[in-house]
Amino acid sequence: MVDDRIGVAGRRLGELLSETCPGAAPCLLEDYVQRLPPIQPIERVNVLGVGISAVNLSQALEAIQGWVAERARTYVCVAAVHSVLECRRDPAVRTILNRSGLTTPDGMPLVWLTRLAGYNHVSRVYGPDLMLAVCQDGLQHGYRHFLYGGGPGIAEQLTERLTGRFPALAIAGVGTPPFRELSSQELQAVDRTISASRADILWVGLGTGKQERWMAERRKFIDTPVMIGVGAAFDFLSGHKPQAPLWMQRSGLEWLFRFVSEPRRLWRRYAEYPLFLALLLAQSTGIKRFDLED
């Protein structure tokens, strides 16, 4: 069930902020997503037409456990403000997020909005935290993990960091795609490699938009119960890039830390944040309607 009480949430956003803050070819994806079977997850909150799952980390872990036990083929997206804005530009990505097993609130603004909509139990389900929690929880279940994404050598560094933290962790394989479109033969080879690894969890770190498209396209061909797109978690947990201090993460200021760290790469992303607030105001006041389309 999707909750659409975001109007009330938008009107109270300022107050809460002050309190809280001190291979298919890409051209065929639009046709492909129309054939994806709808997945009915936990309740969601409509944020500019994107259904954000009203979950906390414990609920996300429970859902993933269930999917692995059932050998389901589903995928999990982690969403921040820039993910929602990407969905406004690309309706196919919005469809993918709305048909995911979970689309978790990765950014604090989305946590605040879901709480303001009445889901007080919601907490941030941040990509790096989710990855560590699933790895730790999976030890008792014997989960096998496959890491796919990151730049050259990042998946290998991440493997070293994770197995150093969790010595019994089973990494079934790693893969780093080139910075170009793969041919159909290459995609099929990736499918076979991951399927042959018998991984229970496939971690995908290809960046916002690209990783969601990849998961939606390939889940039909890869015999892995759960794919989880975590983007920058590969860089953070491998030690390739620094993470914001915990107080900045909790207060919604992680974007500022990342901008200062990588201004030339990220300035366009964060320059759009005022647009998010304007669209949210339009949704909350009823000036503009944003329907959930899946």
Image (spheres, grey):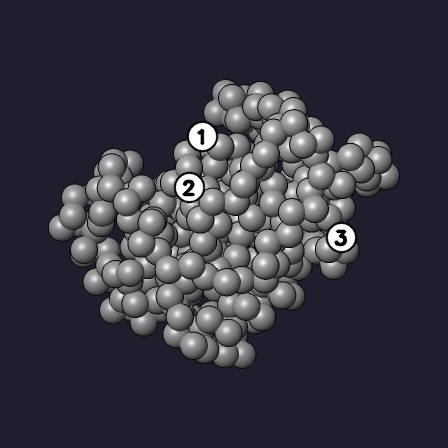
Q: How many discs mark residues in the rendered view?
A: 3
**Res 137 → quadrant:** bottom right
Residue 31: percent from left, percent from top: 28, 45
Q: Secondary structure at mark 3?
A: loop
- Residue 270 visible to an observer of this rendering: yes
- Image quarter where the N terminus lies is bottom right
Residue 191 on image: x %, y %: 24, 59
Q: Amino acid at mark 3?
A: Gly
- Of all residues shown, which one is farthest toward the left? 185
User: Amino acid under label 2?
Assistant: Val
User: Which residue is more in the foreground, 45 or 120?
Assistant: 45
Q: Where does residue 156 sit, x and y in percent of width and height?
A: 38, 53
Task: Residue type at mark 1: give it.
Answer: Arg
- Kindly state the secondary structure of the residue where label 2 is placed: helix
Front residue of this view, candidates 235 and 49: 49
Q: CA distance from mark 3 to mark 2?
A: 26 Å
Q: Which residue is mark 1?
A: 89
Q: Which mark is residue 13?
A: none
Give the camera-side residue of 235 and 205.
205
Q: Is residue 145 visible?
A: no
Q: Label 2 belongs to which residue?
A: 93
Residue of label 3: 118
Identify the residue shown where x is 80% and y is 37%.
12
Q: Label 1 near label 2: C-beta < 8 Å?
A: yes
Residue found 56% across the figure and 48% down from its top: 51
Crowd class of label 1 (few under 14; some 14 to 19; many from 20; radius 10 Å): few
Check contact, mark 3 vs mark 2: CB within 8 A: no
